[in-house]
Amino acid sequence: GESVGLHLPTLSVQEGDNSIINCAYSNSASDYFIWYKQESGKGPQFIIDIRSNMDKRQGQRVTVLLNKTVKHLSLQIAATQPGDSAVYFCAELNSGNTPLVFGKGTRLSVIA
Amino acid sequence: DTAVSQTPKYLVTQMGNDKSIKCEQNLGHDTMYWYKQDSKKFLKIMFSYNNKELIINETVPNRFSPKSPDKAHLNLHINSLELGDSAVYFCASSQVSNEKLFFGSGTQLSVL
């Protein structure tokens, strides 16, 4: 299930189940979105990106869905594995020399 | 063959001291960045440089001075360190400005 704790929102899933991590972005003019994975003690690692002219993009075991109407982005991870345990960030970009803006992050815990 | 490398990994120092963090990327990217991650995992842009020129400076105190001797290096010098500077600092680079950033493994700065 999903819970909002004192710090990061946490999503706990059983190994082998599918995970869905959600992100609400703030700027309706944003036209590029990225998902990053950050493992403990490491830097954020690029997972997948999507531009605003698409509503779905698939990678290896991951799918990103974009709903521009409600400014919502989601990351779906199929057959979640213990190695997927990490903090996941969405980031949005309004093209130009504006910086990439990161969301607050969601901690994914995989239960073996 | 690390893509974005930053040193040191850990930095513990007293208030008032001056310290530097070094960053190098061997990806041939044109743009480099410094991000700050606080204790709640929130990632915020500090600076970005494109081909050694400052592009973004996000209201960072002038005690922080980035220096880019060439496009493969972006160092961060911090004067008169304060307790609130304690955080993890990430260097990153990208080929296209603000898209698909590659992050280093971070420098955990603790100011005592």
Image: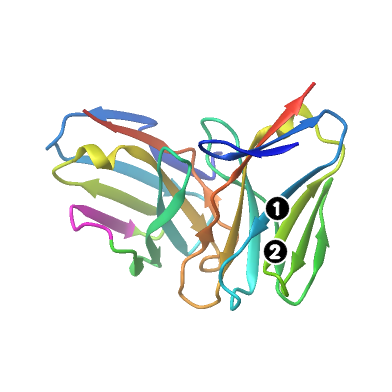
State the residue position of label 2: A72
State the residue position of label 1: A22
The quarter of the displayed image where residue A79 is located: top right
Task: Residue B85: give x, y in percent of width and height.
Answer: 27, 42
Earlier-in-chain disc, 2 versus 1? 1
- Name the residue rendered at 72%, 65% in the picture: A50
- Which amino acid type is marked by label 1? Asn
Task: Evaluate whether label 2 is on the same chain as label 1.
Answer: yes
Could you tell me which quadrant the N terminus of chain A lies in?
Answer: top right
Q: Foreground: A48 or B43?
A: B43
| SS type, badge 2 | strand
Q: What range of the chain is rendered magenta?
A: B60-69
Q: Foreground: A73 or B65?
A: A73
Q: From what the image shows, is residue A96 above or below residue B104?
A: below
Could you tell me which quadrant the C terminus of chain A lies in?
Answer: top right
Specify the subunit that label 1 lies on: A
Residue B91 located left or right of residue A107 = left
Q: Say whether marks 2 and 1 touch (CB < 8 Å).
A: yes
Q: Residues within 10 Å of mark 2 (few under 14, many from 20)?
A: some
- Can residue B72 be seen here? The reply is no
Residue A2 located left or right of residue B40 = right
The quarter of the displayed image where residue B66 is located: bottom left
Q: Foreground: B30 or A67?
A: A67
Mark-to-mark CA distance, 2 and 1: 7 Å
- Which amino acid type is marked by label 2? His
- Name the residue rendered at 47%, 52% in the picture: B92
